[in-house]
Image (spheres, rainbow, N blue to C red):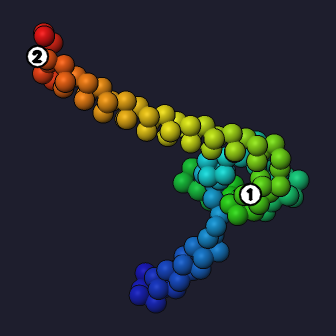
Amino acid sequence: MNWEERLSQWRSELDLFDQLEGWAPLPEASERTGVSRSTLRTWYRSGQIRSRLVDGPHGPQRLVHVDEVASRADASPRIRAKTERVLGLEAQVELLRHRLAELEIRLQAVERTTTGFRPGNATR
């Protein structure tokens, strides 16, 4: 392969990357948007979102446009409610982590004021 052929191939690859910007395989799109793979399949089969088939590392791979999936998911009350529920749970977990950290600090302060107690010493 000469230099000109390799340069031409490289430009073709760059053009392909530009064309695929915003596109993701079903598992990645599902993870990023919270929409199940089966729902994504239903949507692209019914023409609600665009998809394309490309060669992947393990054979043909279906890609969907992530922005379209997100827009379609926002239009679905059920999926929007599910996403809000998940985000709500994540927020609750974060608040509980914060409260636990505060309680650990308070417990350490109480233990320090207890006479004869030293951290790491099991006997008093």
Residue lying furthest bottom = 4
Which residue reaches farthest right? 46
**Does the rendering let one see residue 27?**
no
CB atoms at circles 1 and 2 under 8 Å apart? no
Dot 2 surroundings within 10 Å: few (below 14), some, or many (20 or more)?
Answer: few
Which residue type carries mark 2?
Answer: Gly
Q: Position of residue 19 (x, y in %)?
A: 65, 74
- Coordinates of residue 23 in the picture (x, y in percent): 65, 64
Residue picked out by circle 2: 116
Lateral position of residue 111 relative to residue 30, left or right: left
Instruction: Report which residue position mark 1 lands on.
Output: 69
Label 1's element?
helix
What's the distance in space between the residues labelled 1 and 2, CA to CA?
Answer: 62 Å
Q: Quadrant of the N terminus?
A: bottom left
Question: At which x and y percent is residue 90?
Answer: 56, 40
Q: Nearer the viewer, residue 8 or 98?
A: 98
Q: Residue at x 69, y 55 (%)?
A: 62
Name the residue at 83% across, 47% down: 77
Quarter the C terminus occupies: top left
> Residue 87 lies in what quarter of the image?
top right
